[in-house]
Image: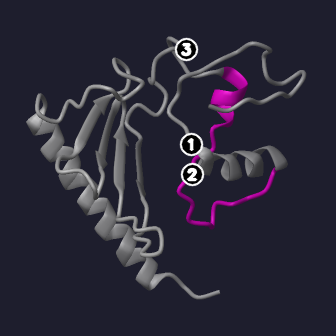
Amino acid sequence: PCLMRWPGKIEPGSTTNALTWALDIFPTLSHFAGADVSDLTLDGKNIAPIILEGAPGDPKSNQHHAGRELFWETGKHAHLDRGNWIALRQGPWKYLQDPNADTPFLFNLTNDPLESLNQAPLQPERLAEMQSRAKELAKAYRASQNTAPSQ
């Protein structure tokens, strides 16, 4: 959830369920400030059109950024006795691998926003696709960390 106020720019009371995340704030504020960040590699997207005009179509849909993937991973933390968590969001679907759970989780957030019904046993093909894609993204991100220029 996020709240924004900009009198004269953002319509009071407007809402959207467009798929966005915290990493979108930097490129969006850069856009509003007129800063050119096109030479930077950013995980976030400029969501100014969503903020100023709302997502196209039904405001309760995820039509805007419908094809967008969100991937995140937590590292292992020995002191906290925490393993490596991996999650992937594709449209309404969220895949989650908890290192302490015997089985992965798959949720349809449109139908189950509280993540109470694990769809993994009911959607084995979607689960396999999302597991494969999450592993692919994890591998790519780890490789990019090893080749990132030092600052």
Q: Residue at x 36, y 77 (%)?
A: 143
Q: Is residue 79 above or below residue 99?
A: below
* Pointer 1 local density, CA inside 10 Å: few below 14, some 14–19, many at least 20: some
SS assignment at label 3: loop
Question: Where, quadrant-wise, is the N terminus in this rendering?
Answer: top right
The reply to whether the magenta stretch includes residue 38 is: yes
As drawn, the residue found furthest toward the right would be 7
Residue type for callout 3? Pro
Q: Of label 1 and label 3, which has the lower sequence position?
A: 1
Residue 8 picture location, percent across and down: 89, 21
Are the residues at dot 1 and dot 3 in contact (C-beta closer than 8 Å)?
no
The reply to whether the magenta stretch includes residue 89 is: no
Q: Which residue is mark 3?
A: 59
Magenta residues, as a range? Answer: 34-53
Q: Residue at x 49, y 28 (%)?
A: 64
In this orientation, which residue lies closer to the viewer: 92 or 122? 122
Q: Nearer the viewer, mark 1 or mark 3?
A: 1
In this orientation, which residue lies closer to the viewer: 120 or 103? 103
Q: Which residue is mark 2?
A: 44
- The numbered mark at residue 21 is 1
Residue type for callout 1? Trp
Q: Residue at x 70, y 52 (%)?
A: 26
SS assignment at label 1: loop
Q: Is residue 42 above or below residue 69?
A: below
What's the CA distance linking mark 1 and mark 2? 8 Å
In this orientation, which residue lies closer to the viewer: 78 or 69? 78
- The numbered mark at residue 84 is none
